Image: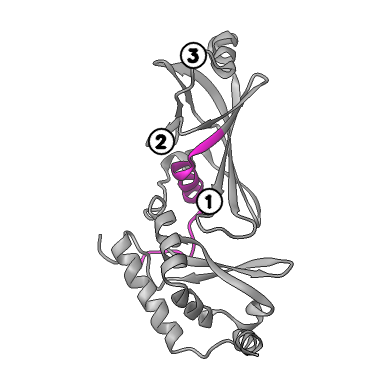
């Protein structure tokens, strides 16, 4: 895709919810009193429905088959976990409510209520917006991209802190890449007893990894022209002593 100027600084709640659903590897399912956790057992349709491949002898499958009309209400829970080890590693939780029905030897779930729980608070997402939304184009590549940035280019992460206000870096003990999407990169700033996040928006959205690389180069060039934050200067002086 070519570059476009039609963009927003952060993904909307529906897009973020679909990104969580697309990348989550495990989920917890509660239906008719039965609660089970599954790893690698779900797939997602284009409209956001979830297909669960569960064992025939599972309590969940039995609950669905024995329920009136075989469509008991269910709750599906997904966690969005940061690829890079940081404090407070769960970035968001996604709760989906709706009927669960048997379908071709599996269970099919269609959400009628969508709640995205972020650090800023829960957001209720309209089910039609959720069905129409698409995951962020970088969502599946994000774990590889962030771990590579953290492990292979710590100097680049440190350079990017020059774009952060000095007061946000006060007493910082570690800075790590927390998240990336087509609109920007988020850094986790850890302190001895707390942590916070700072978002570095791109000048234009990145629709693939090649565009993301160019956006990061722009940020690094901007950081190279910026002054070194006083907070980090003090930390280096303390460490050199």
Q: Which sits in the foreground, 82 or 214?
A: 82
The mark nearer the N terminus, 3 or 2, is: 2
- SS for dot 1: helix
Question: What mark, if any, has residue 47 been given in the picture?
Answer: 2
Residue 126 x %, y %? 54, 42
Q: Which sits in the foreground, 85 or 5?
A: 85
The mark nearer the N terminus, 1 or 2, is: 1
Question: What mark, if any, has residue 135 been given in the picture?
Answer: none
Foreground disc of the pair 3, 1: 3
> What range of the chain is rendered magenta?
4-27
- Residue 4 shows in this picture: no
- SS for dot 2: loop
Magenta stretch encompasses residue 24: yes
Residue drawn where x is 48% and y is 57% of the image: 11
Tell me: residue 227, above or below residue 171: below
Residue drawn where x is 60% and y is 51% of the image: 90
Q: How is the image coloured?
A: one colour
- The residue at which mark 3 appears reads as 56
Instruction: Calculate the distance from the C-alpha at mark 3 to the C-alpha at mark 1.
Output: 35 Å
Tell me: residue 225, above or below residue 71: below
Classify residue 85 by image quadrant: bottom right
Residue drawn where x is 43% and y is 45% of the image: 133
Q: Quadrant of the N terminus?
A: bottom left
How crowded pointer 1 is (Cα within 10 Å; few <14, some 14-19, many 20+) is rated as: many
Q: Which residue is situated farthest in the left direction here? A: 2
Residue 127 x %, y %? 52, 38
Classify residue 190 by image quadrant: bottom right
Residue 139 x %, y %? 42, 52
- SS for dot 3: loop
């Amino acid at each position: 895709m070519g570059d476009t100027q039609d963009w927003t600084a952060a993904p909307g709640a529906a897009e973020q919810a679909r990104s969580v659903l697309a990348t989550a590897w495990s989920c917890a399912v509660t239906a008719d009193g039965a609660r089970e956790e599954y790893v690698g057992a779900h797939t997602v349709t284009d409209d956001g429905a979830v297909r669960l491949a569960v064992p025939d002898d599972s309590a969940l499958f039995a609950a669905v088959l024995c329920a009136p009309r075989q469509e008991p209400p269910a709750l599906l829970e997904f966690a969005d976990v940061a690829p890079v080890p940081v404090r407070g590693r769960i970035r968001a939780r996604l709760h989906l409510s709706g009927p669960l029905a048997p379908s071709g030897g599996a269970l099919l779930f269609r959400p009628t209520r969508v709640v995205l729980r972020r650090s800023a608070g829960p957001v209720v997402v309209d089910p039609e917006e959720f069905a129409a939304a698409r995951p962020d184009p970088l969502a599946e590549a994000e774990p590889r991209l962030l771990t590579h940035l953290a492990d292979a280019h710590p100097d680049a992460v440190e350079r990017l802190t020059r774009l952060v206000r000095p007061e946000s870096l006060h007493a910082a003990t570690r800075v790590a890449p927390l998240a990336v999407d087509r609109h920007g990169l988020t850094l986790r700033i850890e302190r001895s007893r707390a942590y916070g996040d700072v978002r570095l928006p791109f000048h234009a959205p990145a629709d693939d990894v090649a565009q993301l690389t160019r956006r990061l180069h722009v940020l690094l060039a901007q950081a190279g022209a910026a002054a070194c934050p006083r907070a980090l200067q003090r930390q280096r002086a303390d460490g050199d002593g």
